[in-house]
Amino acid sequence: MPTNLPQTYRITDVIEQTPTVKTFEFAHELDFIPGQFVMVWVPGVDEIPVSLSGPSQITVKNVGEATAALHKLKKGNFIGIRGPYGNGFALPGYKVLIVGGGVGIAPMKALAQYGDKDFTSIIGAQTSDEIFFRNYFPGLHVCTDDGSEGEKAFTTVVADRLLGEQKFDAVAACGPEIMLKFLYQIADKHNVPMFFSMERWMKCGIGICGHCAIDPTGWRVCKDGPVADKAILENSEFFKYKRDMAGTEVKL
Amino acid sequence: MLATDFLGIHLKNPLVLAAGLLGTNASILKRVAASGAGAVTMKSIGPKPRAGNPNPTIISFGDVVMNAVGLPSPGYMNLDREWEGLKGIKVPLFASFYAGSVGEFAEVAEAIVPHKPALLDVNIGCPNTKSHGAIFGKDPKVAAKVVTAVKEVSGKIPVMPKLPPSDNALEVAKACVDAGADAIAGFNTWGPGMVIDINTRKKVLGFGTGGVSGPAIRPLMVKKIYDLYEAVDVPVVAVGGITTGRDAIEAIMAGASMVEIGSGTIYRGMDVFAKVAAEMESWMRENDVKSIKELVGSAH
């Protein structure tokens, strides 16, 4: 019988990756596929989906109430974990281009570290302060909006160039939806299979409440995803609109 | 063999997606419809946009499922895309809805009726909110007022209140039938219950408490459906922990004309409907039962 109850584990380490991003290590090792996520319970506050950056590790940006409460937790405190959930990256071929934008760098680190492929990597953020996990990415290209590190360019511009220069079997990516929107067009132009880690408002995390199901297929981000391929992405609500906590449509 | 009629609604089987699960938008409802359900119920539509409770909202362990989703809804005024998307749905569509006052029940029902759902499922049973749901389903007089108000605007669409499993549920059911209810669904989730994480000494569900469902409560449901069948002379619908063909037949023998499946999707996936239907057919064939109607209430 399925158990979908948060299990609380002590935080064994908190690493400040950037001024806004922290990694939390917890005292339990999960058997996971890179790209899978866990529901992280901040006891007494809220529970949010977070992609794993390692088997005992989540990496979270402080963006709202739940993540702010999580960022206040210290080594020795408890967090609740249920999962891993979702599909994870299942990539064809061997030569794979990784693209990670902002806190989307975190799940791509798990892929770079544990995936069995020949990776080339692009990670990007607004500024050098927000780049992290540099040492985990093979063949790394760093991009910043302000040019404070690596190329002064969007990740998508570098992706377009690399896909033009070399033959890749797949593009795997996570980042802001606007980045993925342009990356979709670029991967499509170069005719390379794409696998993007997507996000929608989640409640149950196990595919039964239906809240994160997308139009028009009813593909559930939590259960059928979060990694979507071209067939799911094309002609879908992705890059156009999403639904908020109430289920009301919000334009992107 | 499984095809049946419920208040004039033709169903290919008597298995309905229960309100509250997989019903938030048209796309997922159509997917459930394609996976074998005889009918599907939209997640309860509210009088205004409502975010629901903080997570965790749904947990499960062993044979227990608990939820305190808290009736999130875009509100009836923000459902154009979903109604449009539901036009092509291949099975009867039931519309569940809730409100915060008797007048508001009529207001929400009035907004739903023009979209012609096959049935109005009146949510007076949800335990996970302080101002909606079960507060209208525990007092026979209040429940009757809600049904009367909805019947005034429902036209030809059948009205089915879904009750909480209170001690006085039979009394509430009779009052609803007297007020014009065309069928009674039993029951919303039980309890509510509570789970405490012992490491942090915190309540796990964001709302603190949550309705209890899943196979563990099935015998409680079967007994109450059995009693309900004898108490009212309108069709009865069973919901609560049904995950197999055997469970569905049991509920039908207790008196249900139709059964709803909710938590069964956790245990057996979205295609639980096709699986349960196949199991029912196989049992019926072995036992020479030709129709669902032969089985309804046959344990009495």
Image: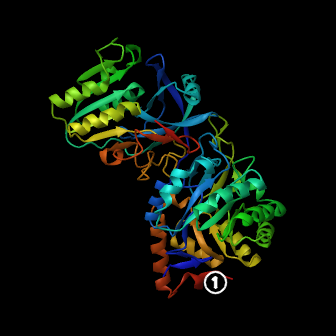
Give the quadrant of residue A170. Answer: top left
Query: Disc 1: which chain?
Result: B
Residue A107 appears at what percent x and percent y? 38, 32
Residue highlighted by disc 1 = B298
Q: Above or below — where is B286 with respect to B208?
A: below
| B143 relative to B120 in the view: left or right | right
Residue B5 appears at what percent x and percent y? 57, 78
Residue at the (75%, 64%) spot, across then down: B147
Residue A79 appears at what percent x and percent y? 55, 32
**SS at circle 1:** loop
Q: Above or below — where is A247 with respect to B116?
A: above
- Crowding near pointer 1: few (<14 within 10 Å), some, many (20+)? few
Outermost residue toward the top?
A: A148
Q: If the image is split into quadrants, where does the C terminus of chain B sit?
A: bottom right
Viewer-proximal residue, B257 or B166? B257
| B163 relative to A194 in the view: left or right | right
Residue B111 visible in the picture: yes
Identify the amino acid type marked 1.
Ser
| B142 relative to B203 in the view: left or right | right
Give the quadrant of residue B115. Answer: bottom right
Outermost residue toward the right?
A: B141
Residue at the (21%, 40%) spot, across then down: A191
Residue A115 visible in the picture: no
Viewer-proximal residue, B171 or B66? B171
Give the quadrant of residue A148. Answer: top left
